[in-house]
DNA sequence: GATGAATGAGACTTCATTCAT
DNA sequence: GATGAATGAAGTCTCATTCAT
């Protein structure tokens, strides 16, 4: 039969495809609803309904609500990428402002937003997963700052770990702020961040192009 | 007997006293359990049991769990006092380090800890209460920094609101960190904060005593 | 002391008096509240509060809520007196209208009103008490009507028991109606009742005074 | 097989069927238990247990106990149809006796019995629903009696509204009586009702066939 | 696989009754 | 006796999860 041939063109995929779509729909719905009403106040039934599948179907794809949350967080962790801190020559404040904007743009596309805070406090396994990811990022940022410090581009007497932590804290808070719907002027934040990171003379030099290739130059 | 008379002056409010104690016990238990397992995962029954009273007694003192939380937060809000920023002459980093230590010491005595994050996102009334408090504090800090900026003690080209926000963010995060049990080296944080606030030459002048009475000096 | 003498005039009564007053207050409050919100929806605490005594005091005077209800009903039963059916000469409709009015006036002074219906259905003991009272009244009415029938004043072929029951039913319903606040025109009801009781020629005779002493006369 | 096709025409709505059955079971259980122990003393859990479903299932079909009661009453209201009063020629007492019997037979098949009295007094919405139904019926009866009065078949000087109310009251009481399990001799009641409605000469005429078609005759 | 009705444990809350003061 | 805080059993209702179709 012709019909069968037509169908045959997608031999076994349709099922798997539909499956994947349902899974995705569930994840999307969960993300949306968790953000809107919080994990505890979102019911499995609601998620299923929003994803236009039956309640029972929920449990075909996820062993339980918690597991769905885990999945969500797994997805999100990628988005918790560290801020790109590859300094190029030029005005560091402008550069950073641009980086910040892009960073948050990327993040907010797949953000779990307000979800995590309380949850992490109660679920050891969850907390560990997230923490590991944070550590990893923190490490990357740390490396960078250390390099910069070695090159003499940063305050020499500041503890890099503390600084890293401060940076990340502000980044997280900034993200919260965005989540709350407050518009953010990246330029101003970049200014503050730069003051925290670099001594004023270095900023001046960077701005005037005297420090061209920050990756290699050490000129103090 | 005279003693009896003396005692008689506080005509033994046993009921009221015990009442207050029970109320306190409930509050303490709630604080503990909320922090341990989170608001949603703590039941009224548990709180009552932990406070060694009957379930019904819980409802004598609080209309429900949420109201108890409100009480907790009310208590805590006082502790969300802004950091004391009255700059005296002397090394600003040392000064700030001392202030930070004292600030967090005070706060942590009555801390709600990990409680709030998720909750605030969903409960409009709650959020408002807390937000108002935050606004108030932010206002105080803002005033201070504005004064300092006018006196020419701070970076002249930085947006004070942004700066205030950054400071407060870091303060909050620092508190979180303490809550997580990580020990904090206030000195290092003070250093970072000072870099963010003051240009290096000013710090130098403060340190060397050239700026003696920061409250009165205006050297623009 | 004079004062003691004055007081002494009511040597031990005051306590008992106050006691009685509290008891009465409780009963009154219960009557009021039961009528307003129903037995089940009235709490012991409310009754006590309304009577301006402590909750515990309630249980000094009544072993429990149910017992208070029993007391209420005991009081009320007296008021379930049968309608006075002593026929005098004169217009029977006018006579009956007056009797009806007085009857309901007396009843409504101490009425439990809407209370009983459902309650009686569930509490065997309660039901029995009330039923007994009803029987007793029914008996009285029955006697009267039988006498009237023997005298030939009533429809001769009607079953007196059925008639009695009908009368009482209407009386009860009439009371309900009053309780619901509907104003009642006793004259009209009297007319209907009379038609039910007496053949038209008898009514005519009664009206014209031909039947003078209904207690003794039999003139058919 | 043909049979299978035939069955296929009612494509076996097993879910919906079972659903309906559960709903019915709940309603039946509620009716039974409400009558047995009263509304307030019956718990949702009990109803569910009696209907052999889980507690939660109760709440699938009814938002709460009260709503179930509403349903019950809705069902019952149909049965509160007014007594059929279409008079045909013949002995009016016999006719009425037959009508009464049939009327109560129909009603008692789906009776809520002792349920309503107290409930109606407290639940405004409930009371309204029932009252409306009553009004409607009262209206029908009223119309009939008015017609009869205009035709000169009834006591001319009696207020039809009062009479209607009396009739309905007795009807309701009669129903109560049946509910209490007392057997009822409809003949006797019919006799009383007829005396209340019709003057004796009319009854005589009806009986002797002089008033043949009561729907058309007007002998004023 | 999909469906959604069914389940029942457990959270929340009320209130009759007791009891220490 | 009086008080009213305390008790805890019991009712209401929700929702994560299962399971028959």
Image: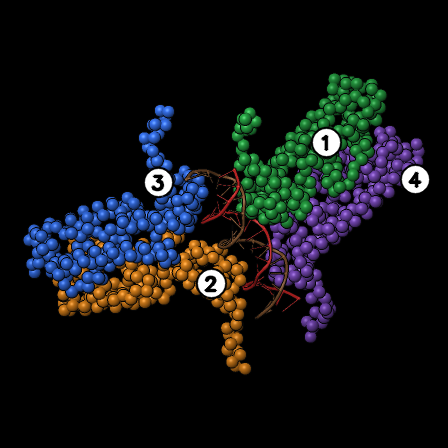
Chain colours: A blue, B orange, C purple, D green, E brown, F red
How far apart, in angstroms, are the residues tagged by discs 1 and 2?
62 Å
The label nearer to you, 2 versus 4, is: 2
Q: Secondary structure at mark 4?
A: loop
Callouts 3 and 2 close, C-beta under 8 Å? no
- Residue C218: x and y in percent read 93, 36
Callouts 3 and 4 close, C-beta under 8 Å? no
Q: Are marks 1 and 4 on the same chain?
A: no
- Locate the C terminus of chain D and report the quarter of the image it occupies: top right
Q: Are marks 1 and 3 on the same chain?
A: no
User: Does any portion of residue C196 appear in the rendered image?
Assistant: no
How far apart, in angstroms, are the residues tagged by discs 1 and 3?
63 Å
The label nearer to you, 1 versus 2, is: 1
Residue at 85%, 34% (x, y): give it. Answer: C158
- Residue C41: x and y in percent read 61, 50
Q: Secondary structure at mark 3?
A: helix
The correct choice, above or below, for D185 with respect to A94 in the image is: above
The label nearer to you, 1 versus 4, is: 1
Circle 1 marks a residue in which chain?
Answer: D
Q: Are marks 2 and 4 on the same chain?
A: no
Circle 2 marks a residue in which chain?
Answer: B
Label number found at residue C142: none
Label number found at residue C216: 4
The residue indicated by pointer 1 is D103
The label nearer to you, 1 versus 3, is: 3
The label nearer to you, 3 versus 2, is: 3
The residue indicated by pointer 3 is A20
Residue at 52%, 64% (x, y): give it. Answer: B53
Circle 4 marks a residue in which chain?
Answer: C
């Amino acid at each position: 039969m012709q019909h069968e041939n037509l169908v045959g063109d997608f031999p076994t995929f349709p099922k798997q495809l539909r499956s994947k779509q349902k899974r995705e729909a569930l994840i999307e719905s969960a993300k949306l609803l968790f953000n809107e009403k919080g994990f505890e106040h979102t019911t499995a039934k609601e998620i299923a309904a929003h994803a236009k599948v039956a309640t029972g179907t929920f449990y075909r794809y996820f062993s339980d609500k918690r597991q769905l949350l885990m999945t969500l967080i797994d997805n999100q962790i990628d988005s918790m990428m560290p801020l790109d801190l590859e300094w190029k020559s030029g005005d560091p404040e402008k550069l950073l402002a641009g980086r910040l904007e892009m960073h948050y743009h990327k993040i907010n596309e797949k953000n779990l937003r307000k979800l995590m805070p309380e949850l992490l406090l109660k679920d050891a396994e969850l907390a560990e997963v997230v923490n590991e990811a944070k550590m990893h990022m923190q490490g990357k940022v740390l490396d960078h700052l250390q390099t910069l410090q070695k090159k003499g581009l940063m305050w020499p007497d500041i503890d890099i770990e503390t600084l890293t932590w401060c940076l990340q804290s502000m980044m997280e808070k900034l993200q919260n702020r965005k989540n709350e719907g407050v518009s953010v002027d990246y330029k101003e934040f970049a200014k503050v961040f730069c003051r925290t990171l670099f001594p004023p003379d270095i900023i001046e030099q960077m701005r005037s192009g005297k420090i061209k290739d920050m990756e290699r130059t050490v000129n103090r």
